[in-house]
Amino acid sequence: MIPLNPILSHIDNIPSTAGKFKPEKSSVCYIHHRLRFHISHPKLTLWPIIFLSFILFFFFLSPTSTTAPRRGLRTTTTTSHGGSSRWETRLKSSAKPRSCTGHTVLVTGAVGFIGAHASVALKRRGDGVVGLDNFNRYYDVNLKHSRKSKLLDRAGVFVVEGDINDDVLLRRIFDLVQFTHVLHLAAQAGVRYAMINPNSYIKSNIDGFVNLLEAVKSITEPPAMVWASSSSVYGLNSKVPFSEKDRTDQPASLYAATKKAGEEIAHAYNHIYGLSITGLRFFTVYGPWGRPDMAYFFFTKDILNRKEISIFEGDNHGTIARDFTYIDDVVKGCLSAIDTANKSSGNGGKKKGEFRIINLGNTSPVSVHKLVRILEKLLKMKAKKKVVLMPRNGDVALTHANISLARIELGYEPRMDLEMGLKKFVKWYLDYYDVKKKSSW
Ligand SMILES: O=C(O)[C@H]1O[C@H](OP(=O)(O)OP(=O)(O)OC[C@H]2O[C@@H](n3ccc(=O)[nH]c3=O)[C@H](O)[C@@H]2O)[C@H](O)[C@@H](O)[C@@H]1O
């Protein structure tokens, strides 16, 4: 990943089309700056050497020199994603399905919790998969690297380290591979963190999503998109269980507002450009390799460390509950959404690509008190509990999915109850941290 030559790596960031290479002003400025640095050297006798190096550099290493790039791709020997031809070969090979009936899927957020599991499941059943992830530091990046090495690498999924806001990179990936589907899971997750870093939600969930949709809609045969919405869009809706027809105009957090905005944005891209888009409203997904910012995860850690945990309650000791949904059930729902998605028609098509919004929950809410009781039983330890009135931090009192539509559209049927699912999580947690972080216990 480390650029071998700063001038080259800078040039490499310039989008180019064969025969249309035009360095951006900033790149030229950068080269001039580098040259000026050398020219200002007291020994003016260096002048001819510099001039000669300049000529040699452009003659041998210019991106437009020998091999003509396909559809505007860069073919330099160094890129921000490694040696270009090796990088391209690995990416293309990872994208190849085992059989001609298999899908070719780009998974964004591939080293995230759901992204890693979904990528592996797709690859295992024979689909071609390319992952994309920016490895951001919202939570322990080592866990993301472990998901990559222990899950994705082993399954043979190639992961591009990059951002969905990088339109040059997206174009490059879409130029190399004709994807049938994009499973878009890259997002700024977490309800409460939106009060700490609101702009990260706009950057990923709005800007990044639009950037991806722009790239997808520009492809001649655009892939169908399946993407992560959230149960949080139901916000202050009190009608339960939550049905896709219920109102979603009362978000309780900025996170929820950006996910709701995502649904509206997706609708517009479906309407104008004929993109086939399925939004999946996930309900508090948990399981092995999960997210450390989620309550079941950090409660486990804190119970083991004998640290106090805060259990939220509503007014008058009202129960706070979640429709906790096990990762394997959610992954099955994602794969089924991919399998059942209609093709995008593109804006030239007569028929509009389809637009679907579907709940993926467990349809059996469990209180936070019960969640803690199960963890205590599994860990064989008593939690130090402090019961507090739920702060106004973006959380809502209850989530509960109506999954009738998921049953019809996806043949979705959640199988795992919370106790069994947490057993699998705790087993993983003990194994993973026993090896990696014994000292922190
Ligand atoms: O399904 C969803 O829509 C959302 O699920 C989770 O959000 P959340 O359900 O709030 O999950 P947690 O943060 O793990 O909280 C679980 C429960 O524990 C409660 N909690 C949380 C923290 C705490 O210190 N104490 C406590 O009682 C919360 O109020 C909530 O009822 C994810 O963090 C979101 O990214 C996702 O979109």
Image (cartoon, helix red, strand yellow):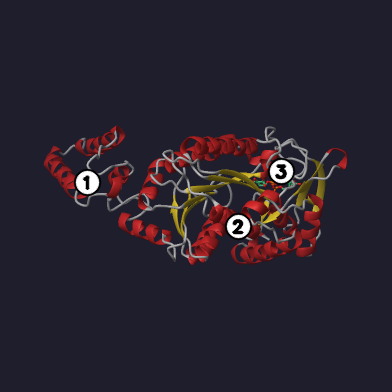
Q: Can residue 74 be seen in this view?
A: no
Image coordinates for residue 88, horizontal then vertical, percent: 35, 56
How packed is label 3: few (under 14 Cα within 10 Å), some, or many (20 or more)?
A: some
Discs 1, 3 touching: Cβ within 8 Å: no
User: Does the Cβ of the disc 3 residue fall within 8 Å of ligand 1?
Assistant: no
For the C terminus, the image quarter is bottom right
Amino acid type of the residue that numbered disc 1 sits on in the rendered structure: Ser
The residue identified by callout 1 is: 62
What residue is shown at x 69% (from left), y 54% (from top)?
325
In what element is the residue under mark 2?
helix
In what element is the residue under mark 1?
loop
Front-most of residues 233 and 307: 233
Does 198 sit above or below residue 9? Answer: above
The residue identified by callout 3 is: 243
For residue 331, the mark is 2
In what element is the residue under mark 3?
loop
Q: How far apart are marks 2 and 1 (CA)?
A: 45 Å
- Using the rendered view, name the quadrant where residue 262 is placed: top right
- Using the rendered view, name the quadrant where residue 423 is placed: bottom right
Of marks 3 and 2, which one's residue comes earlier in the chain?
3
